Image (cartoon, rainbow, N blue to C red):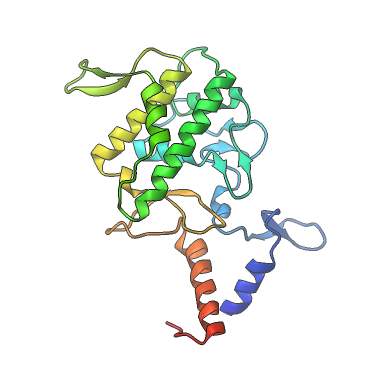
Amino acid sequence: MHLDLLFDLFEGFDTSKQVMTVSDGCQPVFELWWCRVERKGRMTGMAGTTGTPQATEPEGARAWSAAELLRDFANTVDVVQNVEALPESSDLAQWLRHYGLLDGDHQAAEGDLTRARALRAGLRQAMAHHHDGVAAPLPDLDRLAAALPLRVSFGGPRPALAPLGDGVEAALARLLVAVTAAQADGSWARLKLCHADECRWAFYDTSKNRSRHWCSMGVCGNRQKTRAYRARQRTGGPKE
């Protein structure tokens, strides 16, 4: 398909619909909402993007790396389409249990949900700064971290940061433990937000020199490059 035609298809596509269907209402032909093709039906490890998410795997079915955990937590919201995977405090508790952060019968309160969303916003802000490699102060995230129960544990082969107590606050503190673990293994700086304004999905940069800007080069990246190409054509600038 010609690049300009493909661009026009993207530009004319109704982004309120994730799937383009044939006119007679048959099965979807293809999905066009670029990187959300990957998101559809999972919303960071959970089935469905609206309503109450349901775990797609049994609790404890796998061990999540620190980077996976933080990426998926950051992606519990789609800021572009305003889709929230944690609309209620019960959804937060379910998400935390799914990822092995919350044990027992602990339930989340409204204050826990507010705290979790603020923590998520702070972590997303931190990931957005990873593109330029410059550490920026994050006072809001720093205040949130100071309020969560953490301690240094000497119960293992080496001292380690650990949550204090149990419950939802301790589960959220485990996300901060994941930050320190990701920093230690080198994956923290590779967690970024997609540069495309139409996306802003959190992703893990697998490039050797940590220079990746988009969650998907084949979708968001190509779209941005096509847009730049067309802008150069309109202004008479160089095509390369």
Quick one: 94 or 123, which is closer to the camera? 123
Q: Position of residue 111 (x, y in %)?
A: 55, 21
Answer left or right for 80 relative to 17: left
Judged from this view, the residue extending furthest toward the right is 24
Residue 123, image quadrant: top left
Residue ID at (63%, 31%): 87
Judged from this view, the residue extending furthest toward the bottom is 236
Q: Is 40 drawn above or below residue 100 in the view shown?
A: below
Q: Is residue 203 visible?
A: yes
Residue ID at (24%, 37%): 184
Count of numbered labels shown in the rendering: 0
Judged from this view, the residue extending furthest toward the left is 157
- Quadrant showing the C terminus: bottom left
Q: Is residue 1 visible?
A: no
- Quadrant showing the N terminus: bottom right
Answer left or right for 86 relative to 168: right
Q: Is 23 drawn above or below residue 64 in the view shown?
A: below
Quick one: 231 or 142, which is closer to the camera? 142
Residue ID at (61%, 32%): 53
Residue ID at (66%, 54%): 18
Q: Is 205 drawn above or below residue 148 in the view shown?
A: below
Q: Position of residue 34 (x, y in %)?
A: 57, 59
Q: Is 199 drawn above or below residue 159 in the view shown?
A: below
Quick one: 87 or 119, which is closer to the camera? 119
Q: Position of residue 108 (x, y in %)?
A: 55, 18
